[in-house]
Image (cartoon, rainbow, N blue to C red):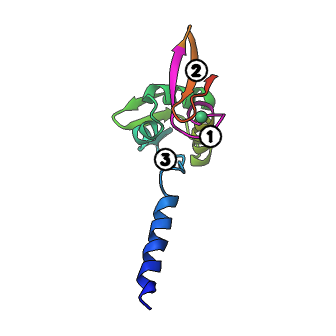
């Protein structure tokens, strides 16, 4: 009977191990409409979760959606009406192109410039991939 508490403890430890930063979840964009503009209120959070500059991510989203926009405080304001799903798809795509290491799939990467070429450098496995 005394083992019951121990079992519980073990269960807790295992649960914690699973959440040990091994799994990186792509952040989810909130969106809000204002007239003919679409606003992402948690934009700066998303960029910082990726460890990327807000401008880099905003430029990507604008290019992909084919629209203009600007950053105001923590928000990204896009001209035009966009569904949350299509914005989320672009954020997912950005993560695959600029955040996850193609070798080991971890998100511990940095963008570095080598001889004028932008490379995705992985802190976990050391792989370098041109982007
Ligand atoms: Zn890697």
Residue at the extreme left of the image, as rendered: 73
How crowded pointer 2 is (Cα within 10 Å; few <14, some 14-19, many 20+) is rated as: some
Horizontal side, residue 75 vs residue 122: left or right: left
Closer-to-camera residue (66/43): 43
For disc 1, the neighbor class at 10 Å (few under 14, some 14 to 19, many from 20) is: some
Q: Position of residue 107 (x, y in %)?
A: 54, 39
Spatial CA span between label 1 and label 2:
15 Å
Assign a secondary structure to mark 1. loop
Which numbered tag is attached to residue 105?
1
The numbered mark, 3 or 1, whose residue comes first in the sequence reads 3
Looking at the picture, does residue 39 appear above or below residue 16?
A: above
Q: Secondary structure at mark 3?
A: loop
The range drawn in magenta is 97-113
Q: Which mark is in front, 3 or 1?
A: 1
Does dot 2 land on a helix, a strand or a loop?
Answer: strand
- Which quadrant of the figure has residue 102? top right
> What residue is rendered at 41% in x and 88% in y?
2
Q: Which residue is mark 2?
A: 119
Q: Judge whether 12 appears above or below 16 on screen.
A: below
Q: Earlier in the sequence, mark 2 or mark 3?
A: 3
Q: Is mark 1 within 8 Å of ligand 1?
A: yes
Q: Quadrant of the C terminus?
A: top right
Asked if residue 111 lies in the magenta stretch, the reply is yes
How many numbered discs?
3
- The residue carrying mark 3 is 31
Task: Name which residue lies at 58% across and 20% down.
Answer: 119
What's the CA distance linking mark 2 and mark 3?
Answer: 31 Å
């Amino acid at each position: 009977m005394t083992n019951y508490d121990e079992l519980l403890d073990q269960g807790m430890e295992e649960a914690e191990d699973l959440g040990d930063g091994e799994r990186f979840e792509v952040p989810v964009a909130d969106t809000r409409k204002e007239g003919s503009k679409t606003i992402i209120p948690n934009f700066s959070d998303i960029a910082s979760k990726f460890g990327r500059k807000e401008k880099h991510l905003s430029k990507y989203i604008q290019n992909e959606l084919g629209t203009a926009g600007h950053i105001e405080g923590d928000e990204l304001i896009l001209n035009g009406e966009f569904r949350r799903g299509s914005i989320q798809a672009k954020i997912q795509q950005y993560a695959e192109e600029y955040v996850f290491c193609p070798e080991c799939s971890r998100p511990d990467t940095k963008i570095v410039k080598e001889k004028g070429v932008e490379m995705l450098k992985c802190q976990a496995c050391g792989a370098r991939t041109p982007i």
